[in-house]
Amino acid sequence: MTDRTAFYAGSFDPLTNGHLDVLKGALTIADKVVVGIGVQASKEPLFTFDQRVELIGKWAAGEIEDDASRLQVVSFSGLVIEAARANGASIMIRGLRDGTDLDYEMQMAGMNETMAPDLQTVFLPASPSVRTITATLVRQIASMGGDVRPFVPANVAEALEAKFRK
């Protein structure tokens, strides 16, 4: 039997507890999870690619220990299906918070299936405790000096505080 590789794409800027909820779920159904950080030249991220890789790695080492070896973080630009294929994935992971996410993600899954029938999209519902979290809201709260600790891992909260203290 071959290893089952899943590709979980996003900006992860910043990494939130919602992302981690979906990532933990992905680890239960795949042997390896490739976290694909989308990079767009036209967008200025809060954290650089390398900083995001470091934040994910530090969280994984402290929280999921043995499973951390089953994670890989890569950057990609362009179509997610091409990035998934390039990294040997047969599964694309998508997190769902609510019905709005479902409507959008179903359209995306349909388009991706047409272009890449060899890739299976798997939807993972967010746990109730993290359904309201978005990276956009976390960035806004952090930029105004609010406490983001309920929404992100401790190492990300520290990085956000340092970023906005400047």
Image (cartoon, grey):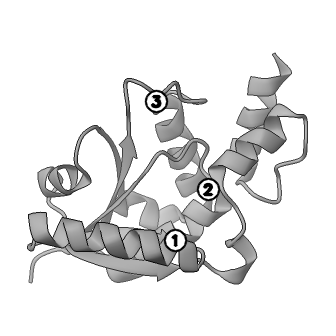
Marks 3/2 in contact by CB < 8 Å: the verdict is: no
Q: Which amino acid does label 1 sit on?
A: Asp
Q: Which residue is rendered at x = 36% and y = 70% of the image?
A: 93
Residue shown at the point (64%, 55%) measured from the top left: 16
Q: Residue 107's image quarter? A: bottom left
| Marked residue nearer the N-terminal end (3 or 2) | 3
- In space, the residues marked 3 and 2 are separated at their CA atoms by 18 Å
Left or right, 116 with respect to 83, comes to left
136 displayed left or right of 53:
right
Q: Is residue 60 above or below residue 164?
A: below
Q: Is mark 2 on a helix, strand or loop?
A: helix
The dot on residue 64 is none
Q: What residue did someone put label 3 on?
A: 50
Distance Cα–Cα, label 3 vs label 1? 28 Å
Is 87 situated above or below 146? below
In the rendered image, residue 63, in percent from the top left (x then y), is placed at: 61, 62
In the image, 114: left or right of 97? Answer: left
- In terms of secondary structure, where does tag 1 sit? helix
> Residue placed at 46% from the left, 79% from the top?
124
Res 96 visible: no
**Residue labelled with disc 2:** 62
Q: Is residue 101 visible?
A: yes
Residue 13: x, y in percent?
57, 41
Residue type (three-letter) at the residue carrying disc 2: Gly
Q: Nearer the viewer, residue 81 or 154?
A: 81
**Is residue 104 rendered to the left or right of residue 158?**
left
Image coordinates of residue 42 in percent, x first then y, are 41, 24
Q: Which of marks 1 and 2 is nearer the N terminus?
A: 2
Q: How crowded is mark 1: few (under 14 residues within 10 Å), some or many (20 or more)?
A: few
Mark 1, residue position: 101
Quadrant location, the C terminus: top right
